Amino acid sequence: MSTDIVAKDLVDAARAIELADSVIGKAVRTLAATGGPDEQQVLAYDLAHASAAVETARSMLDYGAKGEVEATLTCAFVADMVQDLVSRLIGREKLWGVDPSVMAESHDFVSKFRDPRLLASLADKPGPRHLDDDHEMVQATFRSFATKMIAPHAEHVHRENLDVPEEIISGLAEIGAFGLTIPGEYGGFSEGGDGEYMASCIATEELSRASLGIGGSLITRPEILTRALVKGGTEAQKHEWLPKLASAEVMASVAVTEPDYGSDVASIKTTATPTQLDGKDGYAINGVKTWCTFAARSNVLMLLARTDPDRAKTHRGLSVLIVPKPRGEAHGFMFTQPHGGRMEGRPIDTIGYRGMHSYEIAIENWWVPADHLIGETAGLGKGFYYQMEGFENGRLQTAARAVGVMQAAYEAAFDYAQNRKSFGKNIGEYQIIRAKLGRMAVVIQGARQFSYAVAKLMGKGQGSMEASLVKAYVCKAAEWVTREAMQIHGGYGYAEEYAVSRLFVDARVLSIFEGADETLCLKVIARRLVETTR
Amino acid sequence: MNIVVCVKQIPDPASPGALDASTHALKRDGKLILDESDAYGVEMALQLVASAGSGEVYVVSMAPNGETSGMRTALAMGAARGLLVSDPALAGSDALTTAKVLAAAVTKLGGADLIIAGTESSDGYTGTVPEQIAECLGLPSVTFAKKVKIDGQVLKVDRQSETGYDEVECSLPAVISVTAGVVEPRYPSFKGIMDAKKKPLDVVTAGDLAVTPTGWAAAGQKIVNVTQAEARKAGTVIEDDGEAFGKIVAFLENLKLI
């Protein structure tokens, strides 16, 4: 069917976004007046996700102006966003304090772009990315690396629960993947600006397209530590650690979450107590950390600990320490220090996201020198802020990881649909399959373009809220896309021998790690919506 | 040790290509990428210069519309500068004219100790341009190089043959064509990609090089016809009656694989 997109459609799309935004604004004021996110959690959660979809749609408008396919994808995304908003609103109009008829103005637009025939027409039109020449080269480079170096290992590592092959780490180090955000004077080649955020996004998508577990997640942890060091490290610390992170001589894992305090980071109990050892100032660390991904292979833990015993200070009593450790075995490790310090890691088996491995780590009197506390004495009590600096970028990275997983799922489903016959013809010719593929293309391009937009904002020192929004939207979208890709494969999608089954279980982690979806929506997004919507 | 690598920028093989209906030539109006067969030459040049301890790698190319994307990839890999010859009058150039243009481009860069080209491009496959460049420049030419070593002013090449390889020596400067897989091309690094846009990449016309374009009309070669590739035939099914292994061995022997 001819899409016959005209400029008016994009104007209507912009108007639909404006209306949706006004609905959310009104509902947020209702939320603020009726107890806020802590009291009205379901409303707050719905508004956070609706807002994430609206901002994704808004970021698509520039993209839509670049061509007919781009415009069709954009309008289809906006229509999808409106449908999602209305479905969240219906039956809860009083709770939201919104008259649903406000969206009626966009009804014809939504009808046009939710037409199954239109979605089906987009099945094989995922749209160009519109990258500049440099970023196209970044994409081509990482696509080639991931295809040759990562993809051949992806299934085997997943099925056998093996480790990330070392040649992937060394190969990424040679390309410079770990030095992208490290300034030149510290062994990296960051030049500031949005280019490096974009490059990081693009690289992460391509690596994740090959494998979330052994490719797409390798850059995230070093970047989180890098951001914390750049933000709060002393000059000596930057010169000591950043060159090693850039070259992958030091690989990092993040030790923040605790068994009793998952998303409630400010309440963590692990302590770092000033302790002298052989006449040297330092800290003795005691506590239990969990979900420390990559902790066996890593050379250091970026560990958040309470350095102020006054628990009333909550997050203001926390500091970040760089904790060196030997490399351990994937099936578990136990290290001791001569004075009696002890660190024991127990692997947590997971249904997906294999290769990196995650651990619960019990730490007893593990001693580190005083200069391993980021910022040293000036960094005391600032650990929460330093790690948040890294986590914001981590959210953008996670969105890029989700886009990569979705892209792989779409390609697998598309390819399968072209070759699987049912009732006399390829299933890729049936409207129901084509409409699924079309909506996948719409969602993926929307997610990708929003992640690019957030990267540009973060390059300007902005985009904190948008990083949370993109993480919330894209990670949840990945669940739907991988679910539908698996569904298109029929029974074979449920078989481990088809990669789409790996993509499905891998996608589930995206809404859980790097800020659980519900916590992110209630504690970050909804709170910020209330603060900024008066 | 200065080395010039002749590189071709071609339409991305991952995208479906199209032929011009009248000339039967590949359409080149979109984005062009570095021919993978030339990435081997760039890598070999970078390794030879690194071994020599000094010198630079330059890349030259001929392409329509001022397209430089493929050359930027070579610069991102580590080449120091590039020279592109882009001129509408060169459309339809045959292999010999292409060789004349590239030879003139090499001369404009001040010559080189060694000139490297791929054995043949991935989209044209004439396989004659490197030798023609050597003739234009009056230099010795060694084809099908699978291993290259420079010993003072002597070039030592293991030259691929049907039965193995020949050990060939010649004096420098010289022109060599390298086979695919001769080295493992490096991936452009982030730093390389960022630095590439700062490296000099000059664009000149045929007139700047004092080369007379021949164009379609006067080209010494013509594509007279194009036909569809033969459809792949169905494979052979061998039923295992207990002796299937013998048939498989015979099949592989017939293909000279064992």
Image (spheres, coloured by chain):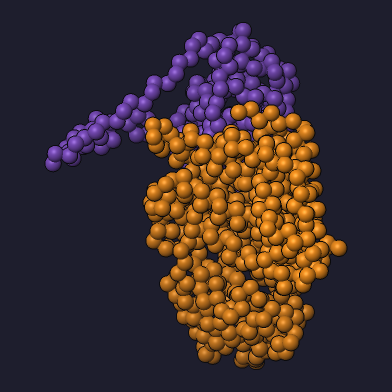
How many numbered callouts?
Answer: 0
- What is the quadrant of residue A108 in the picture? top right
Q: Nearer the viewer, residue B23 or A15?
A: A15
Q: Which chain is purple?
A: B
The answer to whether A408 is drawn above or below residue B101 in the figure is below
Q: Is residue A529 left or right of residue B14?
A: right
x, y percent for residue B128: 50, 21
Question: Could you say which quadrant of the image residue A123 lies in?
Answer: top right
Quadrant of the drawing holding the C terminus of chain A? bottom right
- For image coordinates 76% across by 49% down, the residue present is A101
| Furthest residue toward right | A534
Residue A215 % position (x, y): 53, 56
Q: Taking B197 as reference, is A160 left or right?
A: left
Residue at 41% across, 53% down: A494
B249 or A25: which is nearer to us?
A25
Q: In front here: A467 or A86?
A: A86
The picture places residue A88, in percent across and down from the top left corner, at 67, 56
> Which quadrant: the N terminus of chain A?
top right
Which residue corresponds to the image point at 72% horizontal and 42% vertical from the top-left?
A107
Residue B257 visible in rendering: yes
* In the image, residue B57 above or below residue B26: below
Q: Furthest residue to the top? A: B217
Q: From the viewer's perspective, is residue A427 above or below residue A31? A: above
Q: Is residue B111 visible?
A: no
Residue drawn at 58 percent across, 44 percent down: A440
Tell me the colour chain A is drawn in. Answer: orange
B97 relative position to A312: left or right? left
Q: Position of residue B251 (x, y in %)?
A: 23, 33
